[in-house]
Image: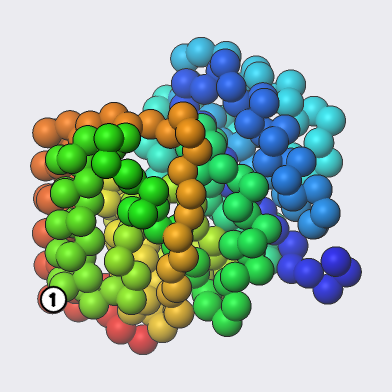
């Protein structure tokens, strides 16, 4: 492991007080053979998320907890964590662990010569588990984003991604979208900056959320996707 790249795992957390401690310990256990830094970002939770995260990280070397005074959204929580992360590779992983961390060692090995690895969960969104409308909308959004932006990956919204540090150093200062389409902007900017993106299937945990998309969320994603397309057309998201 001496020649392995160091890894930072950024865990955005909101209202996870009942599970965050166990989840942190699980991630640390899975990656115990690597040089790992855990960065937990409490995104303005009003429950015991912060105190439980502090308790869990107290005895884990290289673990820290950051906090937003108010809820700012998952994208901002990830960027807060990424700005302080020191690893050669930076993993974005939803702290609810809907995407089991046991996949991480294999995904880190699978990065290869790519600069960004995106988890793809569509094959795990089985009928009877995810609402039909959510699966249909996910497919339509993928087709639209690939067609509009020429992305080399077909999924953008899964909460498990791996970046080489140099990608985030370029992309994060450029980010303008704060809502649900922040993933899309991040990947579009990375690809147009000349970085190589790749995609691999990921598994969902047995208790993964199956919540339906809200009308407000759909409107915000459509609006921000249109904004991003306008920026591309007008050269505000330039190619290298």
- Residue at the extreme front: 128
Q: 82 or 222: nearer the eye? A: 222
Residue 70 seen in the current view? yes
Q: Residue at x 79, y 57 (%)?
A: 34
Residue 81 seen in the current view? no
Q: Residue at x 54, y 61 (%)?
A: 162
- Quarter the C terminus occupies: bottom left
Number of callouts: 1
Q: Residue at x 57, y 16 (%)?
A: 18
- Residue 124 in percent (x, y) is at 39, 48
Q: Reply above or below: 111 against 68.
A: below
Left or right: residue 19 versus residue 213 is right
- Quarter the N terminus occupies: bottom right
Callout 1 secondary element: helix
- Residue at the extreme bottom: 240
Q: 1 or 69: nearer the eye? A: 1
Q: How is the structure coloured here?
A: rainbow
Residue under circle 1? 233
Q: Reply above or below: 128 against 182.
A: above
The picture quadrant where one finds residue 119 is: bottom left
- Residue at the extreme right: 2
- Residue 131 in percent (x, y) is at 22, 35
Q: Residue at x 36, y 54 (%)?
A: 123
Q: Residues within 10 Å of mark 1 (few under 14, many from 20)?
A: few
The picture quadrant where one finds residue 89 is: bottom right
- Residue 170 in percent (x, y) is at 47, 70
């Amino acid at each position: 492991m001496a020649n392995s790249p160091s890894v930072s795992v950024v865990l955005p957390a909101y209202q996870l007080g009942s599970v965050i401690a166990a989840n942190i310990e699980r991630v640390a256990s899975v990656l115990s053979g690597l040089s790992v830094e855990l960065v937990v970002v409490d995104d303005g939770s009003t429950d015991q998320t912060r105190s439980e995260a502090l308790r869990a990280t107290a005895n884990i070397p290289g673990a820290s907890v950051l906090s937003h005074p108010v809820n700012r959204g998952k994208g901002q929580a990830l960027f807060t964590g990424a700005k302080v992360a020191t690893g050669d590779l930076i993993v974005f992983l939803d702290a609810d662990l809907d995407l089991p961390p046991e996949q991480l060692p294999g995904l880190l090995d699978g990065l290869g010569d790519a600069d960004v690895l995106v988890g793809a969960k569509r094959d795990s969104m089985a009928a009877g588990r995810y609402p039909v409308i959510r699966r249909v909308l996910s497919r339509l959004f993928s087709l639209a984003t690939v067609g509009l932006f020429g992305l080399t990956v077909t999924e953008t919204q899964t909460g498990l991604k791996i970046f080489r540090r140099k990608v985030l150093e370029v992309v994060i200062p450029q980010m303008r979208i704060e809502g649900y389409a922040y993933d899309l902007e991040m990947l579009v900017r990375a690809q147009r900056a000349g970085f190589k993106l790749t995609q691999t299937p990921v598994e969902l945990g047995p208790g993964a959320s199956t919540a339906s998309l809200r009308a407000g969320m759909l409107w915000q994603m459509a609006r921000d996707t249109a904004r991003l397309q306008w920026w591309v057309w007008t050269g505000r998201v330039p190619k290298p």
